[in-house]
Image (spheres, rainbow, N blue to C red):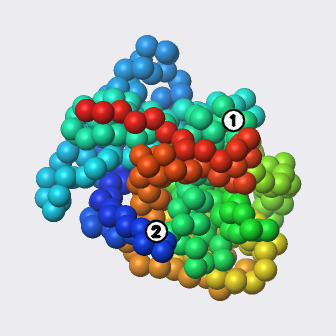
Amino acid sequence: MSGTSLDGLDLVACRFTFDDRWRYEILKGVTIPYSHKWIQKLSTAAELNALDFAFLNNDFGKFIGKQVADFCTDLPQKPDLVSSHGHTIFHQPQNKLTLQIGNGASIAAFSGLPTACDFRTADMAMKGQGAPLVPIGDELLFGEYDLCMNLGGIANVSFREEGERKAFDICPANMAFNHFIKEQGYEYDLDGNLGRTGKVQEELLTLLNELDFYQQKGPKSLGREWFDENFLPLIYSFQLPPEDILRTLYEHVSDQLASATDQFPKGKILITGGGTHNIFLVELFSEKTKHKTIVPSQQIIDFKEALIFAFIGVLRLREEVNCLKSVTGADHDHSAGVIYLP
């Protein structure tokens, strides 16, 4: 799993069993931080010409395959399958276009393992948003919670409504925080400490909260293109010190998290993803929401998304539904993904 926040490559070894329901066990998990070279390559991939982009797709697949091979050396048994989300470069649901790089054939060749990948394309071909995909795992692995929220590069939420699992992207999260903290020479705002010292810029906050995306109903999803074209220019139109930008962003994101989730009956909300480590953000959201917030173990916080994409691969291997029309807006439920053999 490689997310839009460019923190690194998440690798997790999982065991899935089924009796009366699906159960999981995480055997091992690790995040491999990206080198400056890889951050530069992935963050500028959308600007490449077609040939260089094709080379990058192969190279990133080779990189993932080699990391998987190293990761598997001390596992108790050889995995049945690699399930790779890849790294999203383009996501334009309005144009029915999504693209995740990390060539599955290269992953299979360099890991020596069957590889499932490209989980979003089929859904878009079926008139869906191609996102979010994690809700199938929320439904089958974490169904005891009323809502499941992921605070990744983009925040999203899934829930049951009228007997169906539904979900949508809420707003930028780590993608926004990391963008501005990196301008100060840091990888992330530890615990939200820098933002905590700033002041909310009320005019900017109002404009952010009034962005058109927040007025839309789900299914809906966000990509970096929207962030670059609609979100960043608005913030840069204000000349603000970094701590005030971050403080305003924390207020904005917590506003949107609460607004998106409080439309549902009061219940338990599971919070995972890298943004869960941001103590200040979680405090703000917990103060604003009517729900009881549940922060799980660090292993689940860090690797829930990778765990679920492993599960999505298992469902694809079994030719079972791993993509829900109620979530993405596709024509029908389906089993998405392509499998490459080594």
Tell us which disc is closer to us: 1 or 2.
2
Q: Give the left or right position of residue 242, taking residue 326 as reference.
A: left
Residue 166 seen from this side: yes
> What is the crowding at mark 1: few (fewer than 14 residues within 10 Å), some, or many (at least 20)?
some
Please identify the residue farthest to the front as the structure is shown: 19
Whichever of callouts 1 and 2 sits on the residue coming sooner in the sequence is: 2
Residue 21: percent from the left, percent from the top? 49, 72
Question: Is label 1 in contact with label 2 (beta carbons under 8 Å)?
Answer: no
Kind of residue at badge 2 = Trp
Name the residue: 75% across, 83% down: 266
> What is the crowding at mark 2: few (fewer than 14 residues within 10 Å), some, or many (at least 20)?
few
Number of marks: 2
Residue 255: percent from the left, percent from the top? 75, 69
Name the residue carrying label 2. Answer: 22
| Image quarter of residue 155 | bottom right
Name the residue: 70% across, 83% down: 267
Please tell me the numbered disc located at residue 106: none
Q: Secondary structure at mark 2?
A: strand
Given residues 182 and 27, the one toward you in this image is 27
Q: Secondary structure at mark 1?
A: loop
Residue 33 seen from this side: no
Q: Which quarter of the figure is the C terminus placed in?
A: top left
Cα distance, mark 1 to mark 2? 27 Å
Name the residue: 14% across, 53% down: 73
Kind of residue at badge 1 = Met
- Please determine whether, in this image, residue 106 is positioned above or below residue 144: above
Given residues 291 and 275, the one toward you in this image is 291
Q: Give the left or right position of residue 205, taking residue 151 as reference.
A: right
Name the residue carrying label 1. Answer: 126
Residue 39: percent from the left, percent from the top? 40, 40
Name the residue: 68% across, 63% down: 165
Residue 140: percent from the left, percent from the top? 54, 66
